[in-house]
């Protein structure tokens, strides 16, 4: 990429990133509040006899599917419930939805025509919009960990800080991959709302698909889903860091963004 084009990409990324700062702050605040709530009720849930009786009464497959087997500690509660629904589904869905609308929304209006009327390439616009997704990703991953650590200390609990930071670092490739999926959907469909809805549906379906397959004889099929490559319980409870999975997600991200750029370059606006 030539220097002028790189400069254009960063200009677009900065502009789009600033547009997403307020929403990113709101998302981070909501995730922080829900995380603190999980921590505050942890002592009533973790390791209690009533919880164990409930788990014993549930089918083992359902317990494993919903991640209830890891509720023996605060780390397990956060990994099995909060990070599953807050990060694997919730934040990933938001990133995918935002990415889907970033290009498709401009294509539905005159904004894209205005941008491309300037000496700027379609590839620069697309790349800048994708890089701007780092704003909500970085803000959420920077704000939530200290909130959880402080909340845990306030109720007399502790969290493995190293594993917590590792989980948030490993979530970045996962979220970027879903951003790339949303970006591709936006380019292909060309309409922000349908593309965004499909992106959210794919995030949820991916989690459900992988969860069901993981407790079946067809677990290998789940390798096609991004959810396979980020396991909050393995990181936060067992201290297992899947660096290969992160590399797979980054490679998939690069391929999806390249495919989006190629399709966008040849699309009629």
Image: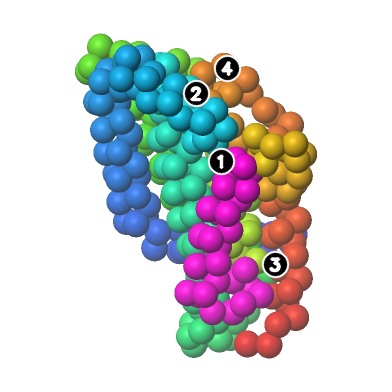
> What residue would you read off at disc 2?
69
The reply to whether callout 4 and callout 3 are in contact (CB within 8 Å) is: no
- Give the residues drawn in magenta, as a range: 185-212
Q: Position of residue 114 (x, y in %)?
A: 52, 85
Q: Nearer the viewer, mark 2 or mark 3?
A: 2
The residue at 70%/67% (across/down) is 260
Spatial CA distance of label 2 from label 3 is 40 Å
> What residue would you read off at disc 1?
172
Question: In the drawing, does residue 261 fall left or right of residue 72?
Answer: right
The residue at 32%/15% (across/down) is 48
Spatial CA distance of label 3 from label 1 is 20 Å
The residue at 40%/35% (across/down) is 82
Q: Position of residue 43 (x, y in %)?
A: 27, 18
- Give the crowd class for mark 3: few <14, some 14-19, many >=20 residues within 10 Å: many
The reply to whether callout 4 and callout 2 are in contact (CB within 8 Å) is: no
Q: Is mark 4 on a helix, strand or loop?
A: loop
> What residue would you read off at disc 3?
260
Question: In the drawing, does residue 220 fall left or right of residue 194?
Answer: right
Q: Magenta stretch containing residue 186, yes or no?
A: yes
**On screen, residue 246 above or below 136:** above
Q: Is mark 3 on a helix, strand or loop?
A: helix
Q: Which of marks 2 and 3 is nearer the N terminus?
A: 2
> What residue would you read off at disc 4?
239
Q: Earlier in the sequence, mark 4 or mark 2?
A: 2
Q: Which of marks 1 and 2 is nearer the N terminus?
A: 2
Quadrant holding the C terminus: bottom right
Q: Earlier in the sequence, mark 3 or mark 1?
A: 1
Q: Is mark 2 on a helix, strand or loop?
A: helix
């Amino acid at each position: 990429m030539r220097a002028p084009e790189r400069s254009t990409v960063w200009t677009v990324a900065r502009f789009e990133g600033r547009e997403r700062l307020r929403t990113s702050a709101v998302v981070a605040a909501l995730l922080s509040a829900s995380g603190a709530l999980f921590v505050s009720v942890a002592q009533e849930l973790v390791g209690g006899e009533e919880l164990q009786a409930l788990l014993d009464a549930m089918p083992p497959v359902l317990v494993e599917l919903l991640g209830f087997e890891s509720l023996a500690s605060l780390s397990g509660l956060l990994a099995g419930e909060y990070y599953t629904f807050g990060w694997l589904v919730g934040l990933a869905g938001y990133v995918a939805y935002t990415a889907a609308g970033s290009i498709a929304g401009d294509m539905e209006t005159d904004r894209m025509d205005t941008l491309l009327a300037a000496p700027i390439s379609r590839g620069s616009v697309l790349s800048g919009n994708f890089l701007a997704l780092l704003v909500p990703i970085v803000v959420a991953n920077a704000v939530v960990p200290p909130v959880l650590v402080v909340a845990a200390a306030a109720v007399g609990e502790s969290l493995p800080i190293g594993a917590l930071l590792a989980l948030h670092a490993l979530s970045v490739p996962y979220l970027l991959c879903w951003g790339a999926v949303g970006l591709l959907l936006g380019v292909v469909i060309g309409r922000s709302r349908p593309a965004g809805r499909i992106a959210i549906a794919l995030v949820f379906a991916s989690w459900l698909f992988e969860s069901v397959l993981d407790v079946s004889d067809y677990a290998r099929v789940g390798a096609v889903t991004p959810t396979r490559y980020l396991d909050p319980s393995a990181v936060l409870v067992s201290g297992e860091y899947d660096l290969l999975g992160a590399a797979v997600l980054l490679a998939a991200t690069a391929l999806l963004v390249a495919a989006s750029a190629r399709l966008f370059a040849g699309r009629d606006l």
